[in-house]
Image (cartoon, rainbow, N blue to C red):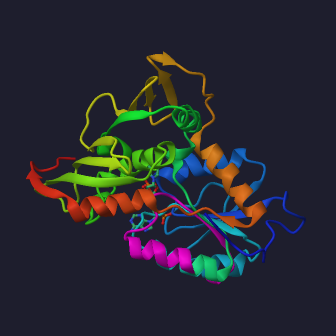
């Protein structure tokens, strides 16, 4: 967490006013989550979009941030939903126009890019929120509190989904880059938040389809700094039911986070954690950061992905078929 100097208010009428926000990149996640949750949040007014295709209904669209700022100069913040590659230039442009910035996960194409825009936002005195939507899942904070009072013995993460369902026809997901870690980083964002000690990667195995330059599956072995084992299995080729589970064995019971941490079980018994959607909480948090003029930047899940590529043994597997 770092703090930006207070050089802006979130509205012309004080910290609790309406925040005039733009969306950049009107693709699957913008349409599935950002647009409906912005519409449902009275703190925000979606006043413009930066898009090379179709803007959300009733919202004016512009090809660039500069064009948008000329037409709608009172935009205060932008939420960036483009793929990670190319975000640095967008963020730089947003900051140069005095905008506060929220970005989708994963933060960037490389660690150096992410570190660069963190520095740029700090120097510009703007709020930067590098989001981790899975950290907002309903079971995450209850799990963190439950684990804080126990001694952890081992952790198993199983995060397996079908890329065809979640990234239909998206070319960028298979470009050189993180591949299966695009969903896997969601699990890493949860375990880096709920576990009490930092993680250290010990071994990694990355599996690359013969016809794609990004991994389709990965197995990671971490220990935490006290030596507790944390085993992780990621797969992007899971047909049928999808699996987004985290199992934690402790000295006093077993915790399970399931369905992307939206459900929590203790010794097999479901706990009441509520059902507030991740993106409702994300935008509530962004409004709060804007009111406080604070940035929220944690690159640790992304650093673990980079470590996997540093240490990982690579094998080639069968061709990926759409
Ligand atoms: P997507 O459907 O491909 O949409 C991305 C949008 O970004 C495009 O529609 C396009 O918007 C714009 N864009 C700019 N440069 C692009 C490029 N080089 N290639 C493709 N699109 C480009 O992707 P998405 O699934 O929404 O994912 C976007 C981000 O959200 C990723 O970081 C992803 O990890 C994250 N995310 C995705 C999901 C999911 O379920 N898919 C869930 C959570 C988070 P315009 O047409 O408006 O120009």
Instruction: Please report the residue visible at 26 percent of the width from the left and 36 percent of the height from the top.
Output: 238
Give the answer, above or below, for where 98 lies relative to 171: below
Instruction: Please report the residue visible at 9 percent of the width from the left and 48 percent of the height from the top.
Output: 318
Q: Quadrant of residue 2?
A: bottom right
Task: Classify residue 34 as left or right of residue 10.
Answer: left
Q: Quadrant of residue 85?
A: bottom left
Write down which quadrant ligand 1 falls in.
bottom left
Residue 255 lies in the magenta-colored region: no
Residue 103 lies in the magenta-colored region: yes
Q: Position of residue 40 (x, y in %)?
A: 71, 44
- Residue farthest along the front direction in this orientation: 226
- Residue farthest along the right direction in this orientation: 13
Residue 177 in sight here? yes
Q: Position of residue 294 (x, y in %)?
A: 69, 65
Residue 106 in sight here? no
Give the answer, above or below, for where 20 lies relative to 280: below
Instruction: Please report the residue visible at 51 percent of the width from the left and 34 percent of the height from the top.
Output: 147
- Residue farthest along the top direction in this orientation: 269
Q: Position of residue 283 (x, y in %)?
A: 66, 51
Task: Classify residue 138 as left or right of residue 306.
Answer: right
Q: Quadrant of the N terminus?
A: bottom right
Q: Position of residue 15 (x, y in %)?
A: 84, 62
Q: Viewer-proximal residue, 182 or 203?
A: 203
Tag count in the figure? 0
Task: Classify residue 95 as left or right of residue 150.
Answer: right
Instruction: Please report the residue visible at 42 percent of the width from the left and 34 percent of the height from the top.
Output: 152
Q: Viewer-proximal residue, 272 or 252?
A: 252
- Please report the bounds of the magenta region as a residue range: 94-119
């Amino acid at each position: 967490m770092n703090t930006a100097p207070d050089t802006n208010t979130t509205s012309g009428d004080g910290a609790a006013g309406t925040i005039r926000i733009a969306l950049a990149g009107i693709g699957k996640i913008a349409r599935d989550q950002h647009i409906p949750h912005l519409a449902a949040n009275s703190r925000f007014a979606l006043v413009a979009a930066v898009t090379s295709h179709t803007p959300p209904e009733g919202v004016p669209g512009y090809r660039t941030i500069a064009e948008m700022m000329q037409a709608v100069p009172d935009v205060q913040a932008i939420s960036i939903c483009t793929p990670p590659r190319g975000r640095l230039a967008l963020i730089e442009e947003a900051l140069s126009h005095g905008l506060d910035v929220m970005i989708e996960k994963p933060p960037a194409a490389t660690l150096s890019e992410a570190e660069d825009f963190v520095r740029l936002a700090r120097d510009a005195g703007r709020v930067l929120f590098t989001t981790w939507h899975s950290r907002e899942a309903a079971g995450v904070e209850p799990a963190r509190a439950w684990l804080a009072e126990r001694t952890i013995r081992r952790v198993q993460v199983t995060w397996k989904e079908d890329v065809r369902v979640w990234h239909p026809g998206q070319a960028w997901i298979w470009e050189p880059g993180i591949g299966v870690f695009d969903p896997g980083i969601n699990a890493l964002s949860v375990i880096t938040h709920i576990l009490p000690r930092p993680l250290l990667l010990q071994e990694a195995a990355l599996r690359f389809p013969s016809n794609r330059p990004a991994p389709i599956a990965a197995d990671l072995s971490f220990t935490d700094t006290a030596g507790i084992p944390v085993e992780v299995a990621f797969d992007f080729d899971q047909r049928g039911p999808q699996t987004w589970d985290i199992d934690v064995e402790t000295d006093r019971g077993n915790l399970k986070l399931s369905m992307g941490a939206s459900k929590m079980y203790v010794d097999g018994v479901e706990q009441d954690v509520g059902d507030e959607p991740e993106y409702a909480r994300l935008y509530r948090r962004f409004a709060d950061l804007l009111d406080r003029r604070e940035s929220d930047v944690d690159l640790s899940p992304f650093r673990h992905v980079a470590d996997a590529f540093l240490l990982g043994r690579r094998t080639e597997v069968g061709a990926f078929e759409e």
